[in-house]
Amino acid sequence: MSFSVMPPEGDAHNPQSGWKQASSSLSLSEVHSSIPIPQGKPAWRRFLAFAGPGALVAVGYMDPGNWATNLAGGSQFAYSLLAVVLISNLIAMLMQAMSVRLGVATGRDLAQACRDHFSKPVSIMLWLLAEIAIAATDLAELIGAAVALNLLFKIPLMWGLAITAVDVLLLLFLMQRGFRWLEGFVIVLMGTIAACFGIEMFLAKPDWGQALHGFIPSTQILTNPAMLYISIGILGATVMPHNLYLHSSIVQTRAFERNPKGRREAIRFATLDSTIALMLALLVNAAMLILAAKVFNGNGLTKVAEIGEAYKLLEPLLGTVFGSILFGVALLACGQNATITGTLSGQIVMEGFLQIKLKPWIRRMITRLIAVIPALVVTYLYGSQGMTQLLILSQVILSLQLSFAIFPLLIFTSDKKKMGEFVNPTWMKALGWLAGFVVAALNIYLLVKTFNWI
């Protein structure tokens, strides 16, 4: 069965509707409106048709960058920073809901919206920043997957990087089969990650009373400099700029009716989809921190931050080899999942900002090479310690770029001329701008502290 690709209708392509120029292309045109929405079916069937993009977004919230910060937070401060994990995920849910609104209401992804609103010099600057962020994201995923291969199968890091670099071919294969295949593959890996950490929780037997108490914010987080530093790291590793571009695009893969009723339903179901997926990401991130709190902090090991060190310690501390194996399998699944969405984001950003249409495999190979070359060089020169430092640097780069994705998203989705009836409601605007300024201030602080400027 084939489905025609329908161009967005209505105000989205009207140059007088708040945009400086009309959008002239479809986001991810090869899969745009390719997934049908069943008509006349129960609401739950229609929701299932919209379910999937949330999973692709959620994997970015449990990538190897999150692992380092969650391990450090749990080993050093036990359960105290679970509140930060919760707040970070709530901010992520809010931003992804706005991305859904933008994509559905305007027919533009965030990159296209920036191109159609800002001047060309500003658009070029935003494109460069987005490309740097995506390369930094891809770098973190490459490192995580290579470390997992090394820990599980003793594959040298250099070979692990090379193996991980060619998984771009897997993405190409899945996209050719259909976007649902890609979503299904990601969902299976997410289920694997969740199952691994579920078993880890069973083996670790954490103090659930203390864990629940850790979700209550404490003033100590702000008054203790070390705790604040790790908290900002958790926030910076959780809210990912490339996910805002990604989500605003892939939500348009659904063939919903391009009229007010169809868009309202699409926003409602797509937001529910992403919220459910991000709740799973919250549980995984919380499980990482709880595991570190129980196994490392509970045994007086308060300086465990490296993934490799955590892997080696889990077996003797949990009393079973499965503790380490499950940890490694989950890490490999996280790295593999996130590389898929990172390279897809690269295609969306280049096409959206520059309107350059390259063959998908060429665009994805470019994104992968930008990340793999520095990883190979650093690994060759400095080994695993150098990779750890490179992973930290990638998170700093992401923190610096985040505001350049959040604030354009807030500007567009808060503009009634652009969004019409789908403009952010007052409560969403208030929370969005508050979150945006808090994230910007904290990430600047993180950047300054990382380079010891204060």
Image (cartoon, rainbow, N blue to C red):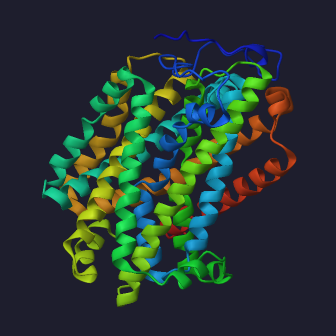
- Quadrant for residue 453, please give it: bottom right
Which residue occupies the foreground of this view, 154 or 186? 186
Q: Position of residue 339 (x, y in %)?
A: 37, 42
Q: How many marks?
A: 0
Which residue occupies the foreground of this view, 59 or 199? 199
Q: Is residue 78 above or below residue 389?
A: below
Q: Position of residue 217 (x, y in %)?
A: 66, 76
Q: Is residue 454 left or right of residue 393?
A: right
Which residue occupies the foreground of this view, 53 or 125? 53
Residue 213 appears anywhere in the view: yes
Q: Position of residue 117 (x, y in %)?
A: 72, 26
Q: Residue at x 65, y 83 (%)?
A: 223
Q: Position of residue 17 (x, y in %)?
A: 82, 19
Residue 304 appears anywhere in the view: no
Q: Residue at x 59, y 14 (%)?
A: 25
Q: Residue at x 33, y 57 (%)?
A: 330
Q: Is residue 277 above or below residue 41?
A: below
Q: Is residue 247 above or below residue 324?
A: above
The C terminus lies in quadrant: bottom right
